Image: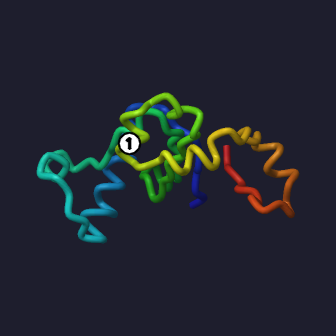
Amino acid sequence: MALDTRLTRDPAELDAIYRFRFQVYYGELGARLPEDTIRTGRLRCDLDDVAYQYASFENGQVVGCVRVVDLKDIRQDNALIAKYRLHEVINTWGDMPSPSLDEWRSQKNSEIGYLPFAS
C-alpha cells in the first residue's frame, strides 16, 4: 500500500506522532527518558507547540514523521532559544527569508536543494 505523507494539525494524528516517537526513541533506540514520559508513552517537547508536523501513514498508522521549526516562529521566545541553545543558529540564519515550496522546487541546483512533500 502507498504511503500518505502530509502536514497534520489533527490532535489524534499528533498524538499518534508522539507515540511513534516514543516507540522509536525509547523502544528501539533505548533512549533514557523522564519517568513521566515513560508513563505516558508519548515523546513531545516545547518545540511541538510551534512546529510543522509531517507524518507518513500506512494503513492509518504512523510509520515516519518529521518536525519542522521555522526560526521566525521562535525568534521572540527566549525560553525556547535558551533551552535548545539556538542563539548562534538564529544569529547566523534567523534573518534569511524562508523560501516557499515553489521556490525550493525551482532551485534544483542550489546549496539548499529541495525537499519534495506529498500533499
Left or right of residue 28, residue 55 in this image? right
Left or right of residue 47, residue 26 in this image? left
Give amino acid for label 1: Ala
Residue at point 54%, 32% (across, down): 73
Q: Nearer the viewer, residue 18 or 2?
A: 18
Residue at point 70%, 56% (across, down): 115
Residue at point 45%, 58% (across, down): 63
- Report the residue marked by disc 1: 82
Residue 93 higher or lower than 30, as above or below? above
Rendered-image quadrant of the N terminus: bottom right
Circle 1 — which element?
Answer: helix
Q: Indicate the position of residue 7 as horizontal and vertical percent values.
A: 57, 40
Residue at point 59%, 34% (across, down): 72
Q: Nearer the viewer, residue 4 or 71?
A: 71
Q: Indicate the position of residue 108 as horizontal and vertical percent values.
A: 85, 60
Rendered-image quadrant of the C terminus: top right
> Dot 1, how many residues are within 10 Å of its Cα: few (below 14), some (14-19), or many (20+)?
few
- The extreme top residue here reads 76
- The extreme bottom residue here reads 29
Q: How many marks?
A: 1
The quarter of the picture where residue 81 lies is top left
Q: Indicate the position of residue 59 as horizontal and vertical percent values.
A: 47, 53
